[in-house]
Amino acid sequence: MISDAFYSEFVRGFQTEAERLGYHGILSMSDRATGNIDILQRGPAQKMSGFVVANDGDVTPEMVTQLESLSIPIVLAENHIDEQRLPCVLGDNFMAGYRVTRHLLNLGYRKIALLREARRSIEAW
């Protein structure tokens, strides 16, 4: 189960678009503690048309290197690896934060809080 709202919507959008294009999407979750990607051990990777790696911090550069060794196209989502030239799709969190804050300021709000990461700490501006 995916409890993160961003990744839940990401997976839903990925699945919808894959089906629209006639592909079948398979979700495989990885655990950094194992140090490898479980789909490589199960064998069906050779039948894959490509991988979309949506990284929430559990996929290491070494794991991506394992995927590259299969010679299957890879696209990184919400991640990039400096040493590897792979296509990636990144959100612009800075601009999103700016636009949200600007909108609230335009509505007249002056005390705006920010909830960050899993720590759920609050910072007042």
Image: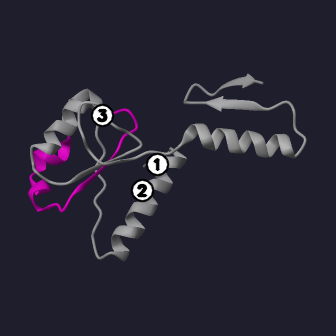
Looking at the rendered structure, the kind of residue marked 1 is Tyr
Give x and y (percent) for residue 6: 52, 48
Give x and y (percent) for residue 124: 77, 24
Viewer-nearest residue: 3 or 85: 85
Residue 51 marker: none
Looking at the rendered structure, the kind of residue marked 3 is Ile
User: Given contact means CB atoms under 8 Å apart, are the residues at marks 2 and 1 in contact?
Assistant: yes
Instruction: Report the residue marked by disc 1.
Output: 7
Residue 11 marker: 2
Res. 49 image quadrant: bottom left
Viewer-nearest residue: 94 or 28: 94
Among the two numbered marks 2 and 3 on one chain, the one whose residue lies closer to the N terminus: 2
Crowding at mark 1 (Cα within 10 Å: few <14, some 14-19, many 20+) = some
Left or right, 112 with reference to 108: left
The boundaries of the magenta stretch are 37-59
**Residue ID at (70%, 44%):** 99
Instruction: Report the residue marked by disc 3.
Output: 81
Res. 36 image quadrant: top left
- Say if the magenta span includes residue 45: yes
- Say if the magenta span includes residue 96: no
Left or right, 67 with reference to 89: left
